[in-house]
Image: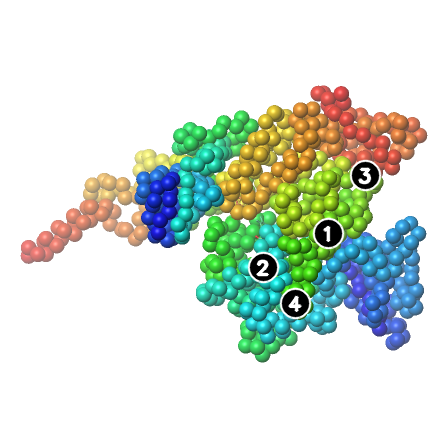
Amino acid sequence: MKTVYVCCGTNCLAAGAKKVLSELRQECAGMEAEVLPRIKETGCSGFCEYGPIVTIADEGENDITYYRVKESDAAEIAQKTIAKGELIPRLCFHKDRNQPVASKMENPFYSSQKKIALRNVGLIDPADLQDYLARGGYEGLKRALELGSEGVLEEMRLSGLRGRGGAGFPTAAKWETGAKQKEFPKYIVCNGDEGDPGAFMDGSIMEGDPHSVIEGMLIAAIAVGSEQGFLYIRDEYVHARRSIGKALEEAKKAGFLGRNILNSGFSFDAEIVRGGGAFVCGEGSALLESIEGKVGEPRHKPPRTSEVGLWRKPTVTNNVETLANVPFILAKGGKAFAQIGTEGSKGTKVFAMVGKVKRTGLVEVPMGITLHDLIFEIGGGIKNGRQFKAVQTGGPSGGCIPQSMLDLQVDFDNLTKFGAMMGSGGMIVMDDTSCMVEVARYYVDFLCEESCGKCTPCREGLRQMRHILTEICEGRGQDGDLETLERIARTMKDTALCALGRTAANPVLSTIRYFREEYNAHIHDKFCPAGVCSKLSVFKIDPETCVGCGLCSTLCPAKAVIGEAKHPYRIDPQRCTTCGSCRNKCPKKAIITERRGENGSKD
Amino acid sequence: MVARIDHKECIFEPGECIVTVAARNGIEIPTLCHYEGLCGLGVCRVCVVEMDRKIVPACITKLEKPCEILTDSERVREERGMMLALLRKRAPNSEVIADLAERYHAPDLPRLTVAEDADRCILCGLCVQACKALGSSAIATVMRGTKKKIGTPYDDISNACIGCGSCAQVCPTGSISVKDENGVRKIWHKEFRLVFCKRCGALLGTEKMLKKNRITDALCSDCRGYDTAEQIHQVLSK
Ligand SMILES: Cc1cc2nc3c(=O)[nH]c(=O)nc-3n(C[C@H](O)[C@H](O)[C@H](O)COP(=O)(O)O)c2cc1C
Ligand code: SF4
Ligand code: FES
C-alpha cells in the first residue's frame, strides 16, 4: 500500500496544503482496494519555500516527491502517480534545467541532510500515536525504564549531547546536577519559547513530532527523579500547542504518561504553559519566573536553576530540539549518536536557513559541516546571481561571518571562537545588498525592545549602542565611535546579569571585526556601499548596462525612475529612497549605488 | 573561612555576601540597589568586584569558599566607571550619581546621550521591593527593555498606595517626590491627609497608614506609653 504524505507545516498550510489534502482525499476515495493509499497529514518537511509538498511512498524505500502542488494537481497525482506510479515531471524538483528528480533523497536540499531531531517530522501524522510507535517511538522510554537513573545518565554522557537552546551546555551534566539534588519535588521544563527571529525548528518539532519531545522529557524525568513537567510554549505557536496538547492526551491514554507508567512504578505528568511574549522569557531563569506567574525577568546566578529553580525546587530545563534527540540516544545508544559530529559537538543541528539563499527552509546536518556546504550545496547558493556577503548565525546573540570564513566547520566552539554563536540555529544568509552596520543596528534595536531592562549594562548599554549605530547609519558617525561601541560592549559582556546582555554586543562586535571598512565608509566617507542606508546612498542606473525594459519604473514606489522604453532609464536622486525594489528585480543588474550628496542629490 | 579581599584576610561565614564581609573589614564597595533587609536585586551593577578573576556583583554574590577578591583593580575601576558613565546619562539630575561618577572616575564619553525623560531614577527597583515588603505593592516596574519605567499601574492613582513613603526612603537617588504640606502628603499623584499625635503633635503618618495598621487612638507611641503608665499608676495607687 502506498502512503501519501501531505506536508501541513505552517508554511505549507499558508500555501494551501489543506486544500490539496482534501482534494487528494476526494480523488482517492473511489480507488480500487489494491491502489488505495493511506493519506497522511504531516508536520513541516523543511523545504518550506517549495511548499505545499506531497510525497508518495511505496512500502519499500522509494518515493516520488512533488513541490508547489496546487489543488488542481490533485486529480493528476491520484490518477498517474498514486494509481500507476507514473512521474509527473512538471511537479518535480529540477536539479538542472531539464533534469527532474523523483525521490526526495535525490533532491540536493535533502540529500546531504542527516535527520535525528527531525527524524519523524514530515513522515508521521503528529496526531496519530500509532505513527510514532511504528517508527520506534517510546522505545527509548522503555530502555530508560530498564536502565534507571544512573544508566540513563551514562548513555547521555556517552552521547556527548549539548543543549540546542543556545548555550550548548552538556545535557548529561545538567541532568546529573538535577539528579544529585535532595529537594523534592523536582521539575522538568521544556523550553519552547523560540524567540530568535528567523528560527522555527522548535515549533516544527512540536507540531510535527510532539511525542518525541514528551518522550525526551520522560527520559529526563527518569534520570533526574522528577514527576512533573512543564512545556513552556511561545504564545504565537497555536498549532504547536494544539499538537502537544493532543499528544499529551494520547500518551496518557496509552499509559506512557501519568501514574505508574508501563507498570514500572514510575510516574510523570506534564502540562502546557503559554509563553510570556518577550524574547527574554526564553532565558532559562526568566522562563521559570514566567511559569510562576511573575514578570519574566532573569534571576541572578548562582544558584543554578538545576539546584534552585521553579518554586525554588530543582528544575532541569531543556530546549525542544535537545529533548527530541534524547529518545534516539536511548534507543540507539549514546555511542551511535557520538559517532556523528565533531570532537566537542556531537550529533546534528537543525538550522533555519533563510535570507538570500536559493533554497530556504529547515535543514538538519551533522555538526562540523562547513558553512559553504550548508549555503551552497544544500541552500543552492545565492539568489538572483548576486554575491554572498555574510551569514548571520545565532540570532541576536550571534554574529556575522564573512566570505573568507566559509570553510569554517559549524559547531558550538568554532562559531563562538569566531565571534558568532550557534544560538538556536537561526541562519540568515546575506548578499551584497545587505549593509552590515544596519544589520548590527537591527539586532541592537530588537534587544532594546526585547530585553527585560532590569540591569544597567544591558539596558543603558543597548540604548547607547542603538544611538551611536543610528548616528552612523544616518551620516553623523564620528571618529572614535567604533572604540566607544567596543568599550560599551566590553562592559556589557563582563557585567550584565544574564546571557542576553552578555552576548548582546556580538552582532556589533562581529560586524566591526569583519566589516570594519564598511563602518569606515559610513563614518568617514558618509557612504553606504550596500545602498541600504538611505541618507548615505542613492541608486543610479548604469546607462551602459540598461536595456530600457522599464521594469524598474513600474516597480518604484517613489516614482523616482524616469525615462522611456528601449532607452536607458534614469533615477531621480531626490526621490529615490533606496528601498531596493528596482535593484532586486533588474534583470540586467544595472542598478548601482552611489554616495548621496549634501542636498539629497548624488555627488 | 577566609577570603582575601584587597590582599586582606577576612573571615566569613559561608553564605555571607561580599559587601557585608568587606564592610566589616573596613573595605568600602559602592552600592546603589542594595538595601539591608530587602531581597537582593543585583541590578545596578556599580558594586562589581573581581572574584578569582571574574567580575561579580558584590551585593548578591555569596562567599562559599576561600577566594581572592579585588575591589579596586584596574578592571573593576574600568567596569565600575563605565557603569557610572552610563547611569549618569540615565539620571543626569541625580547628585548621588554625579558624585559617585566623579569619585570613581567615570570616563567622559562624548557620544553617550541622555535618556529621554531622564531625571534622577536609575530604575533599580528598590522602591518596588520596599512597597512589596510592606504589603502594599502599589508600584511596579512597567514595560521592558529600554522603555522600562517605575510607576503605579497605568500611571494612574493607585488604590493600594497608603502614602507611607517607604519607596522614597529606600530610593538611592532621591528620585521619588514626597511633599508634606498643610497637613497633606503628596506622593505618586495622590494626596493623603496626615495625622498628628493628638497630645504632642508628632507626625504619625497618613490616615491610610493608621487604618492599615489599625491604630485608632491617634497617639504616638511615646504618648501612648505615657498614658499606659499613668493608668497602671492609678490602679496601683487605689
Ligand atoms: C535571551 C535568551 C533567550 C533564550 N531563548 C531561548 C529559547 O527561545 N529557547 C530555548 O530553548 N532556549 C533559549 N535560551 C537558552 C536557555 O536559557 C537555556 O539555556 C536552554 O533552554 C537550556 O536548554 P538546553 O541546555 O537544552 O539548550 C535563551 C537564552 C537567552 C539568554
Ligand atoms: S542582561 Fe538584559 S535581559 Fe538580562 S537581566 Fe540584564 S537587562 Fe535583563
Ligand atoms: S548594589 Fe550590587 S548590583 Fe546594585
Q: Circle 4 is placed at which residue position?
A: A333
Q: Chain of mark 3?
A: A
> For the residues marked 3 and 2, what is the alpha-carbon distance in whole angstroms?
41 Å
Q: Circle 3 is placed at which residue position?
A: A386
* In front of the other: B142 or A76: A76
First in sequence: mark 4 or mark 3?
4
Q: Is residue B224 visible?
A: yes
State which quadrant residue B180 falls in: top left
Q: Chain of mark 4?
A: A
Q: Amino acid at mark 1?
A: Ile
Q: Amino acid at mark 3?
A: Arg
First in sequence: mark 4 or mark 2?
2
Name the residue at 65% across, 26% down. Answer: A523
* In front of the other: A330 or B175: A330
Q: Amino acid at mark 4?
A: Gly
Q: Quadrant of the C terminus of chain B?
A: bottom left
Q: Is residue A25 left or right of residue B36?
A: right
The residue carrying pointer 4 sits among few (fewer than 14), some (14 to 19) or many (20 or more) residues within 10 Å by Cα, namely many
First in sequence: mark 3 or mark 2?
2
Q: Circle 1 is placed at which residue position?
A: A369
Q: Circle 2 is placed at which residue position?
A: A171
Q: Which mark is residue A283?
A: none
Circle nearer the viewer, 4 or 2: 4
